[in-house]
Image (spheres, grey):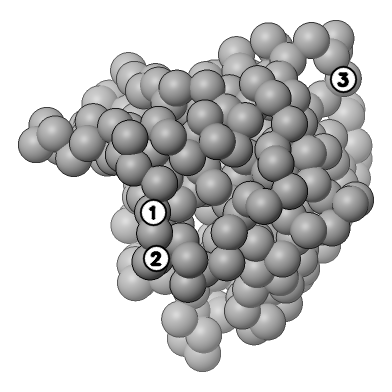
Amino acid sequence: MTLAPEARVAIDGHVRLLLAWNAAINLTALRTPEQIARNHVLDSLVCVAALRDLAAGRGRGTTPPSLIDIGSGAGFPGIPVAITMPTGRTAVVDSIGKKARFLRIVANHVAEALYKGDQGPPEIAAIAERAEDLCRRHDQRETWDLVTARAVGTIAEVAELGLPLARRGGHVINWKLDSGDGTVHREIADARRICQASGGGKPRIIRLAAADRVGLAGHCLVAIEKRAPTPERYPRPAAERRRAPLLS
């Protein structure tokens, strides 16, 4: 990946803002620029090639893909991905108001940094709302090409929240660490039934060769293709999801 100078400025400014805000708001447990560079920025960027491949198969020509990042927190992976893919319409979502305010400031910085670039700044909106509530909005439900989630929950939980937001032919993409103990494969097995019920295909692991080279061994993606409309009952209320998970 080759980053334009303005893209580097945008990413650098995102991290500087994170370090400044983190003193007052708990946005990340990582405290040094080096930790954030590897475990947040690089963890987001090593996935861009895979996301481009997924977006290329959606049957929408050369139109930049739309992307919504749920549970975005400090803005990873949504902000770096929006800068480097690039995306068209992008939303970073967090239900905590203070975090959403931080994300709005970062989005403004990114727009300013990329304003003079060849493609112009991506359209990034910060939304202070729970993903399950966002799924009920007609302007959001089944409108997104890529739905991303990192450190949000199990594959089943992300599938139930993400598939209602994805358009047919789009994908829900979950950042995961495959430590080799079988956890990821068990999560995939547990998620198959809710994926099918929500209009998705079988979750599949995408290995990331670049992750090993930058010290992120085992980091991978789990992608779920949206194949059919999601029934209106999904996502279920949080209490029902906890009480009666749909297991295969």
Would residue 20 appear left or right of 141 to someone viewing this image? left
Viewer-proximal residue, 228 or 22?
A: 228
Labels 2 & 1 near each other (Cβ < 8 A): yes
Asked whether 68 or 20 is in front, the reply is 68
User: SS of the residue at dot 1?
Assistant: loop
Three-letter amino acid code of the residue under disc 3:
Thr
Q: CA distance from mark 2 to mark 3?
A: 38 Å
| Residue that sits furthest to the bottom in the current view | 24
Residue 2, labelled with which disc? none
| Label 2 vs 3, first from the N-terminus | 3
- Report the residue marked by disc 1: 245
Which of label 3 and label 1 is nearer to you? 1
State the separation of the CA atoms marked 2 and 1.
6 Å
Position of 187 relative to 24 (above/below)? above
Name the side, left or right, on which 52 lies relative to 64.
Answer: left
Q: Position of residue 164 (x, y in %)?
A: 68, 44
User: Image point 84% across, 14% down: which residue?
Assistant: 60
Does the residue at mark 3 contact the one at mark 1 (Cβ under 8 Å)?
Answer: no
Q: Which residue in the protein does label 2 denote?
A: 242
Where residue 176 appears, as percent x and y from the top left, is 34, 40
Which SS class for mark 3?
loop
Q: Name the residue: 54% across, 47% down.
A: 160
Give the residue type that dot 1 points to: Pro
Give the quarter of the figure containing the N terminus: top right
Q: For mark 3, does the 10 Å Cα neighbourhood hold few (<14), some (14 to 19), or many (20 or more) residues?
A: few
Task: Please give the residue where the numbered disc 3 appears in the rendered image.
Answer: 63
Q: Residues within 10 Å of mark 2 (few under 14, many from 20)?
A: few
